[in-house]
């Protein structure tokens, strides 16, 4: 067989096989062969000898061991990472300040309203007259006796005119009575003389008894007329006095139509209105702050009230004003309300220009003052067991119980537990504890070495 025949023989065999099996192309025949090979594979694997399987397993184990040995260092480094490097931790910085010796004044803060120290109510002294004129307004400063308002005087003027007529009539009656008295006395003298002559003539027989009786009767009538004239003069004088008294009353009423200030001060309220009928039983026409004196009236808890005394210095601050007013405690009430447990305090303001009655104000009363060891109020830590202060000694925090004395908003007096010169943490807190190491920093932010306190 030639070489060409040998080369073409597989092709002829393949074509013959496709024709026998009924496949039209090479691809279909190849797919069928692969499917048959897959079905026969398990049978072929089961037919593999055991020593071949063992050889394959040993080779796989050797390959895995070789791979593990080659990568042993990276795997060990990942399973056992090295510990982090040790870095020396710097102690936390805290702001410290030295305890100092100085004067401290404790203040009690009270609040209340501004009131007049003495308020004068100005009401009309006569009633039933309309307000005719108003001379002042609220806020005006008035002097004692100054006219504030005037009431209508029409009725009083009419009464004064009538009184003048009565007075003139009384004066005329007095003049008439005096003339009658003079006439009666003259007639009395004449009849008395005639009666005396008749008595003498009767003794000598030159007149009759009847004529003597007539002269006697005439004398008695003259005496009666004289007495009547005297009584008429008395009545006329009494009428004159009555008219004068009525005039005095009318003049007083006329004066009372001018409403005057009883004392110097500032008008705090004006309720008078033009045309309104004045009444003493109604609201006062004016309210005056005597001498313009204003003070703070505050209700104080009984615990604070026990520490306040009359004469203590104070400062009063009002809304809208930054500078406080100089004041002093004028009055401390001896009574505490049994329901609210509050007592009343009056604080007089020395000079109070421009203050408004009823305005809310706050007063700071100096209740105690002395010299002692002082620390910032922020350096004191209050716990259930009492107050403590954190002292820095050689860079180590020591929490020390203290006994406090006087206190203000910014400072506190330490009676026991801290000495002057001790370095204390300016702002106490829980971020550092007893025994912690810290780096002390002064108030200006400059580091300071922690030294042992003397």
Image (cartoon, grey):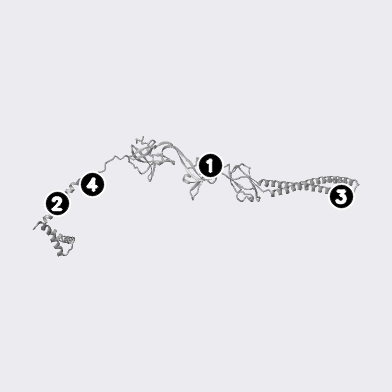
What residue sits right under mark 1 in the picture?
Answer: 348
Q: Is residue 327 left or right of residue 93?
A: right
Looking at the image, residue 259 sits to the left or right of residue 432; the answer is right
Q: Earlier in the sequence, mark 1 or mark 2?
A: 2
Where, by quadrant of the figure, is residue 382 drawn? top left
Mark in the foreground, 1 or 2: 2
Q: Alpha-carbon distance for marks 1 and 2?
A: 110 Å
**5 or 41, which is in the foreground?**
5
Marks 4 and 1 sit apart, C-alpha to C-alpha, by 83 Å
Residue 12 picture quarter = bottom left
Front of the two marks 1 and 3: 1
| x, y percent for residue 110 | 48, 44
Image spot of residue 308 (x, y percent)? 49, 42
Which residue is the site of mark 2?
59
Q: Are marks 1 and 2 in contact (CB under 8 Å)?
A: no
Q: Residue at x 9, y 57 (%)?
A: 2
The residue lying at 12 percent from left, 55 percent from top is 52
Viewport quadrant of the C terminus: top left
Q: Residue furthest left?
A: 1
Residue 9 vertical placement versus 420 (above, below):
below
Task: Please tell me whether mark 1 sits on a helix, a strand or a loop.
Answer: strand
The alpha-carbon separation of the residues under discs 2 and 3 comes to: 198 Å
The disc, 3 or 4, on the residue closer to the chain's N-terminal end is 4
**Secondary structure at numbered mark 2:** helix
Of callouts 1 and 3, which one flags the residue occurring earlier in the amino acid sequence? 3
Please report whichever mark, 4 or 1, sits nearer to the chain's N-terminal start: 4
Residue designated by label 4: 78
Q: Earlier in the sequence, mark 2 or mark 4?
A: 2
């Amino acid at each position: 067989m030639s070489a060409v025949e040998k080369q073409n023989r597989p092709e002829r065999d393949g074509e013959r096989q496709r024709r026998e099996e009924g496949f039209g192309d090479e691809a279909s025949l190849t797919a069928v062969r692969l499917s048959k090979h897959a079905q026969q594979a398990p049978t072929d694997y089961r037919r593999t000898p055991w020593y071949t399987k063992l050889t394959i397993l040993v080779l796989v184990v050797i390959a895995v061991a070789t791979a593990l040995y080659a990568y042993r260092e990276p795997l060990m480094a990942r399973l056992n990472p090295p510990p982090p490097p040790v870095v020396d931790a710097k102690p936390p910085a805290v702001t410290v300040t030295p305890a100092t010796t100085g004067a401290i004044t404790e203040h009690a803060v009270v609040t209340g309203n501004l009131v007049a120290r003495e308020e004068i109510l100005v009401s009309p002294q006569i009633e039933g007259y309309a307000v005719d004129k108003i001379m002042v307004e609220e806020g005006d400063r008035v002097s004692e006796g100054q006219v504030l308002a005037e009431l209508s005087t029409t009725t009083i003027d009419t009464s004064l005119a009538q009184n003048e007529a009565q007075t003139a009539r009384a004066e005329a009656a007095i003049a008439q009575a005096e003339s009658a008295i003079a006439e009666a006395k003259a007639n009395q003298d004449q009849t008395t003389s005639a009666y005396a002559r008749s008595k003498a003539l009767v003794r000598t027989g030159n007149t009759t008894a009847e004529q003597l009786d007539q002269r006697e009767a005439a004398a008695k009538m003259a005496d009666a007329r004289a007495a009547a004239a005297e009584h008429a003069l008395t009545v006329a004088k009494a009428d004159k006095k009555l008219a004068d008294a009525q005039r005095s009353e009318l003049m007083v009423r006329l004066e009372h139509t001018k409403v005057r200030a009883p004392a110097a001060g500032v008008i705090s309220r004006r309720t008078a209105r033009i045309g309104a009928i004045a009444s003493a039983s109604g609201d006062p026409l004016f309210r005056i702050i005597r001498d313009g004196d204003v003070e703070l009236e505050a209700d104080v808890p009984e615990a604070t009230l026990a520490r306040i005394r009359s004469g203590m210095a104070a400062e009063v601050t009002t809304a809208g004003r930054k500078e406080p007013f100089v004041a002093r405690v004028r009055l401390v009430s001896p009574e505490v309300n049994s329901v609210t447990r509050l007592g009343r305090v009056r604080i007089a303001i020395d000079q109070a220009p421009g203050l408004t009655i009823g305005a809310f104000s706050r007063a700071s009363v100096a209740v105690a003052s002395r010299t002692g060891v002082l620390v910032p109020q922020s350096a004191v830590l209050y716990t259930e067991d009492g107050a403590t202060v954190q002292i820095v000694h050689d860079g180590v925090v020591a929490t020390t119980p203290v006994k406090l004395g006087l206190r203000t908003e910014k400072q506190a007096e330490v009676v026991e537990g801290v000495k002057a010169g001790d370095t204390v943490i300016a702002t106490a807190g829980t971020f550092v504890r007893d025994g912690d190491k810290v780096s002390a920093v002064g108030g200006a932010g400059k580091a300071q070495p922690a030294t042992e306190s003397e």
